Image: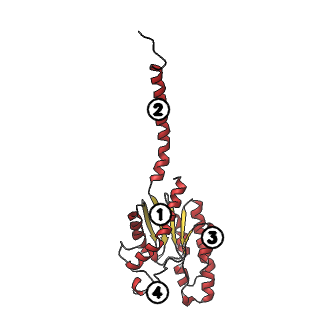
Amino acid sequence: MAPVSAFGKGSSVRQFVIGLTALVLGLGSLPAAAQQARPVNIVALGDSLTAGYGLGPGDAFPVKLQAALRAKGHDVTIQNAGVSGDTSSGGLERLDWAVGEGVDAVILELGANDALRGIDPAVTRRNLDAIIGRLKEKRIAVLLTGMLAPPNMGSAFATAFNPIFPELAAKHGVLFDPFFLEGVAADASLNLSDGMHPNARGVDAVVRRILPKVEELIAEVRSRRGG
Protein backbone atom coordinates (compact mmCIF):
# COMPACT_ATOMS: atom_id res chain seq x y z
CA MET A 1 0.00 0.00 0.00
CA ALA A 2 1.38 3.35 -0.97
CA PRO A 3 2.19 5.68 1.96
CA VAL A 4 -0.29 8.50 2.68
CA SER A 5 1.28 11.81 1.71
CA ALA A 6 1.05 14.98 3.78
CA PHE A 7 -1.51 16.16 1.23
CA GLY A 8 -3.65 13.03 1.43
CA LYS A 9 -5.75 11.96 4.40
CA GLY A 10 -4.17 14.53 6.72
CA SER A 11 -5.11 17.31 4.33
CA SER A 12 -8.72 16.14 4.28
CA VAL A 13 -8.86 16.30 8.08
CA ARG A 14 -7.48 19.80 8.06
CA GLN A 15 -10.00 20.88 5.43
CA PHE A 16 -12.80 19.34 7.48
CA VAL A 17 -11.69 21.21 10.59
CA ILE A 18 -11.38 24.49 8.68
CA GLY A 19 -14.83 23.99 7.16
CA LEU A 20 -16.37 23.14 10.53
CA THR A 21 -14.80 26.21 12.11
CA ALA A 22 -16.15 28.41 9.35
CA LEU A 23 -19.59 26.89 9.83
CA VAL A 24 -19.52 27.52 13.57
CA LEU A 25 -18.36 31.09 13.06
CA GLY A 26 -21.10 31.59 10.50
CA LEU A 27 -23.74 30.26 12.87
CA GLY A 28 -22.42 32.51 15.58
CA SER A 29 -23.17 35.55 13.43
CA LEU A 30 -26.73 34.56 12.67
CA PRO A 31 -28.35 36.04 15.77
CA ALA A 32 -26.93 39.48 14.98
CA ALA A 33 -28.07 39.19 11.37
CA ALA A 34 -31.49 38.05 12.47
CA GLN A 35 -31.71 40.95 14.92
CA GLN A 36 -30.85 43.42 12.17
CA ALA A 37 -33.45 41.91 9.86
CA ARG A 38 -36.22 41.99 12.46
CA PRO A 39 -38.98 44.52 11.67
CA VAL A 40 -38.74 47.84 13.50
CA ASN A 41 -41.51 47.92 16.09
CA ILE A 42 -42.76 51.45 16.76
CA VAL A 43 -45.44 52.56 19.21
CA ALA A 44 -47.33 55.79 18.53
CA LEU A 45 -48.13 57.01 22.04
CA GLY A 46 -50.58 59.87 21.99
CA ASP A 47 -54.06 61.28 22.29
CA SER A 48 -56.96 61.62 19.81
CA LEU A 49 -54.61 62.93 17.12
CA THR A 50 -52.90 59.55 17.18
CA ALA A 51 -55.96 57.43 17.97
CA GLY A 52 -57.81 58.67 14.88
CA TYR A 53 -60.76 60.43 16.48
CA GLY A 54 -63.74 60.67 14.12
CA LEU A 55 -62.04 58.61 11.41
CA GLY A 56 -62.44 55.13 9.97
CA PRO A 57 -60.01 52.47 11.27
CA GLY A 58 -57.89 52.70 8.14
CA ASP A 59 -57.42 56.46 8.36
CA ALA A 60 -55.73 56.80 11.75
CA PHE A 61 -52.26 58.33 11.77
CA PRO A 62 -50.36 55.12 12.79
CA VAL A 63 -52.11 53.08 10.07
CA LYS A 64 -51.39 55.56 7.31
CA LEU A 65 -47.84 56.14 8.51
CA GLN A 66 -47.11 52.41 8.51
CA ALA A 67 -48.48 52.10 4.97
CA ALA A 68 -46.36 55.03 3.75
CA LEU A 69 -43.21 53.62 5.31
CA ARG A 70 -43.79 50.14 3.90
CA ALA A 71 -44.41 51.66 0.46
CA LYS A 72 -40.89 53.08 0.72
CA GLY A 73 -39.47 49.67 1.58
CA HIS A 74 -39.22 49.97 5.37
CA ASP A 75 -40.04 46.81 7.32
CA VAL A 76 -41.94 48.40 10.19
CA THR A 77 -44.91 47.80 12.44
CA ILE A 78 -46.60 50.76 14.11
CA GLN A 79 -48.87 50.14 17.08
CA ASN A 80 -51.63 52.63 17.77
CA ALA A 81 -51.40 53.57 21.46
CA GLY A 82 -53.46 56.70 21.09
CA VAL A 83 -56.23 57.41 23.61
CA SER A 84 -58.70 60.18 22.87
CA GLY A 85 -58.73 62.80 25.60
CA ASP A 86 -55.45 61.62 27.09
CA THR A 87 -53.12 64.06 28.80
CA SER A 88 -49.42 63.79 29.56
CA SER A 89 -50.39 62.50 33.02
CA GLY A 90 -52.46 59.72 31.46
CA GLY A 91 -49.64 58.83 29.09
CA LEU A 92 -47.21 58.52 31.97
CA GLU A 93 -49.61 56.36 33.98
CA ARG A 94 -50.11 53.87 31.14
CA LEU A 95 -46.59 53.95 29.79
CA ASP A 96 -45.47 50.52 30.99
CA TRP A 97 -48.36 48.61 29.45
CA ALA A 98 -48.66 50.80 26.35
CA VAL A 99 -44.97 50.30 25.53
CA GLY A 100 -44.20 46.65 26.22
CA GLU A 101 -41.35 44.29 25.45
CA GLY A 102 -39.84 44.30 21.98
CA VAL A 103 -40.61 47.94 21.22
CA ASP A 104 -37.77 49.66 19.35
CA ALA A 105 -39.06 53.22 19.16
CA VAL A 106 -41.84 55.54 20.28
CA ILE A 107 -43.45 58.49 18.53
CA LEU A 108 -44.51 60.61 21.50
CA GLU A 109 -47.51 62.84 20.73
CA LEU A 110 -48.99 64.21 23.95
CA GLY A 111 -49.71 67.64 25.37
CA ALA A 112 -52.57 69.00 23.26
CA ASN A 113 -55.19 68.17 25.90
CA ASP A 114 -52.99 69.58 28.63
CA ALA A 115 -53.10 72.91 26.81
CA LEU A 116 -56.82 72.76 26.07
CA ARG A 117 -57.56 72.11 29.74
CA GLY A 118 -55.19 74.78 30.97
CA ILE A 119 -53.09 72.32 32.96
CA ASP A 120 -50.07 73.93 34.56
CA PRO A 121 -47.26 73.70 31.95
CA ALA A 122 -44.89 72.69 34.73
CA VAL A 123 -46.95 69.50 35.15
CA THR A 124 -46.87 68.80 31.42
CA ARG A 125 -43.12 69.33 31.34
CA ARG A 126 -42.57 67.03 34.32
CA ASN A 127 -44.69 64.25 32.82
CA LEU A 128 -43.11 64.35 29.37
CA ASP A 129 -39.66 64.53 30.94
CA ALA A 130 -40.43 61.39 32.94
CA ILE A 131 -41.82 59.54 29.91
CA ILE A 132 -38.77 60.27 27.78
CA GLY A 133 -36.43 59.41 30.63
CA ARG A 134 -38.05 56.03 31.18
CA LEU A 135 -38.01 55.22 27.47
CA LYS A 136 -34.32 56.07 27.29
CA GLU A 137 -33.62 53.81 30.26
CA LYS A 138 -35.14 50.99 28.20
CA ARG A 139 -32.97 51.98 25.22
CA ILE A 140 -36.06 52.86 23.18
CA ALA A 141 -35.53 55.51 20.51
CA VAL A 142 -37.86 58.50 20.73
CA LEU A 143 -39.35 60.98 18.29
CA LEU A 144 -40.97 63.78 20.29
CA THR A 145 -43.66 65.74 18.44
CA GLY A 146 -44.33 69.28 19.56
CA MET A 147 -47.57 71.07 20.25
CA LEU A 148 -48.49 74.76 20.46
CA ALA A 149 -50.85 76.37 22.93
CA PRO A 150 -54.17 77.57 21.50
CA PRO A 151 -54.26 81.36 21.11
CA ASN A 152 -57.23 81.67 23.48
CA MET A 153 -55.04 80.45 26.36
CA GLY A 154 -53.18 83.75 26.33
CA SER A 155 -49.56 84.76 25.82
CA ALA A 156 -48.40 83.94 29.35
CA PHE A 157 -49.59 80.35 29.03
CA ALA A 158 -48.02 80.01 25.55
CA THR A 159 -44.72 81.39 26.84
CA ALA A 160 -44.60 78.65 29.46
CA PHE A 161 -46.07 75.84 27.34
CA ASN A 162 -44.56 76.11 23.87
CA PRO A 163 -40.88 75.79 24.87
CA ILE A 164 -41.51 72.51 26.73
CA PHE A 165 -41.06 70.37 23.65
CA PRO A 166 -37.88 71.76 22.05
CA GLU A 167 -36.24 72.07 25.45
CA LEU A 168 -36.98 68.47 26.42
CA ALA A 169 -35.80 67.24 23.02
CA ALA A 170 -32.52 69.09 23.51
CA LYS A 171 -32.16 67.90 27.11
CA HIS A 172 -32.59 64.23 26.20
CA GLY A 173 -31.01 64.34 22.76
CA VAL A 174 -34.02 62.81 21.00
CA LEU A 175 -35.44 63.42 17.55
CA PHE A 176 -37.87 66.31 17.44
CA ASP A 177 -40.75 67.39 15.21
CA PRO A 178 -41.67 70.97 16.20
CA PHE A 179 -45.45 70.90 15.59
CA PHE A 180 -47.48 67.77 14.88
CA LEU A 181 -50.25 69.72 13.12
CA GLU A 182 -47.96 71.93 11.02
CA GLY A 183 -49.76 72.81 7.78
CA VAL A 184 -53.00 71.22 9.00
CA ALA A 185 -54.14 73.28 12.00
CA ALA A 186 -56.69 75.98 11.11
CA ASP A 187 -57.16 74.63 7.56
CA ALA A 188 -60.86 73.79 7.33
CA SER A 189 -60.33 71.53 4.31
CA LEU A 190 -57.98 69.29 6.33
CA ASN A 191 -59.99 69.07 9.54
CA LEU A 192 -63.22 67.60 10.81
CA SER A 193 -66.15 69.91 11.49
CA ASP A 194 -64.88 70.47 15.04
CA GLY A 195 -61.91 72.34 13.56
CA MET A 196 -59.51 70.51 15.87
CA HIS A 197 -58.99 67.00 14.54
CA PRO A 198 -57.55 66.16 11.10
CA ASN A 199 -59.80 64.45 8.59
CA ALA A 200 -58.42 61.70 6.35
CA ARG A 201 -56.78 64.25 4.04
CA GLY A 202 -55.34 66.03 7.05
CA VAL A 203 -53.80 62.80 8.31
CA ASP A 204 -52.27 62.27 4.88
CA ALA A 205 -50.70 65.72 5.13
CA VAL A 206 -49.30 64.98 8.60
CA VAL A 207 -47.85 61.69 7.37
CA ARG A 208 -46.18 63.25 4.33
CA ARG A 209 -44.59 65.97 6.42
CA ILE A 210 -43.39 63.82 9.30
CA LEU A 211 -42.21 60.90 7.17
CA PRO A 212 -38.54 62.01 6.93
CA LYS A 213 -38.34 62.32 10.72
CA VAL A 214 -39.75 58.84 11.19
CA GLU A 215 -37.22 57.53 8.68
CA GLU A 216 -34.51 59.09 10.86
CA LEU A 217 -36.04 57.24 13.81
CA ILE A 218 -35.89 53.95 11.92
CA ALA A 219 -32.28 54.63 10.93
CA GLU A 220 -31.44 55.24 14.60
CA VAL A 221 -32.94 51.88 15.54
CA ARG A 222 -31.03 50.11 12.77
CA SER A 223 -27.80 51.82 13.84
CA ARG A 224 -28.26 50.66 17.41
CA ARG A 225 -28.68 47.12 16.13
CA GLY A 226 -25.31 47.36 14.45
CA GLY A 227 -25.97 47.73 10.81
Q: CA distance from mark 1 to mark 2?
A: 39 Å
> What residue would you read off at disc 1?
42
| Image coordinates for residue 171, horizontal then vertical, percent | 64, 69
Q: Amino acid at mark 4?
A: Ala
- Relative horizontal placement of residue 204, taking residue 46 as reference (left or right): left
| Image coordinates for residue 217, horizontal then vertical, percent | 51, 64
Name, please, the residue furthest toward the top.
Answer: 1
Binning the other alpha carbons within 10 Å of mark 2 as few (below 14), some (14 to 19) or many (20 upward) gives: few
For the point 47% across and 44% down, which residue is it?
Answer: 30
Mark before the other along the chain sequence, 1 or 2: 2
Q: Amino acid at mark 2?
A: Leu
> What residue would you read off at disc 4?
186
Q: CA distance from mark 3 to mark 2?
A: 50 Å
* Secondary structure beneath label 2: helix
The correct choice, above or below, for 27 with respect to 75 in the image is above
The correct choice, above or below, for 167 with respect to 118 in the image is above
Q: CA distance from mark 1 to mark 4?
A: 29 Å
Q: Are marks 1 and 2 in contact (CB under 8 Å)?
A: no
For the point 63% across and 78% down, which residue is it?
Answer: 122
* Secondary structure beneath label 4: loop
Q: Residue 72 — which label? A: none
Q: Nearer the viewer, mark 1 or mark 4?
A: 4
* Secondary structure beneath label 1: strand
> What residue would you read off at disc 3?
170
> What residue would you read off at disc 2?
20
Q: The N terminus is located in which quarter?
A: top left
